Image (spheres, helix red, strand yellow):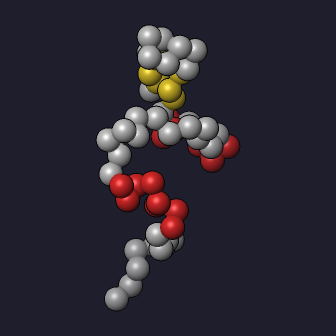
Amino acid sequence: MYFINEQMLPGIVDIQSATLDDAQAHPPAAQIQTAERLDYMSDLAAMPQFERYPGP
C-alpha cells in the first residue's frame, strides 16, 4: 500500500492513491520516474476528455 526508499527519496513515503478513502482530498505534489515517460504523457491534460465512453 506504500513504498519507502530512504536511499533514493529520503523522508518521502509513496502512498498508493487507490488505497485512500478520499483520494480527491490528496492531490499529487510531484511526478516521479519521468525519465522514461512516453512523450505524450506530459500533455494528457490537453487531450479531449470524456466523462463516459464516447458514443458513435
- Towards the viewer: 10 or 17: 10
Residue 46 to residue 18: above or below:
below
Residue 49 visible in the shown view: yes
Residue 24 to residue 43: above or below:
above
Residue 13 to residue 29: above or below:
above
- Image position, residue 51 (x, y; %): 51, 71
Count numbered badges in the picture.
0
Residue 22 visible in the shown view: no
- Image position, residue 32 (x, y; %): 46, 35
Q: Residue at x 46, y 61 (%)?
A: 44
- Image position, residue 25 (x, y; %): 67, 43
Residue 36 to residue 8: above or below:
below
Residue furthest top as drawn: 7
Splitting the image into 4 quarters, where does residue 55 fall?
bottom left
Quarter occupied by the N terminus: top left
- Towards the viewer: 24 or 49: 49
- Left or right side of 35 for 10: right
Q: Residue at x 36, y 38 (%)?
A: 35
Residue furthest right as drawn: 25
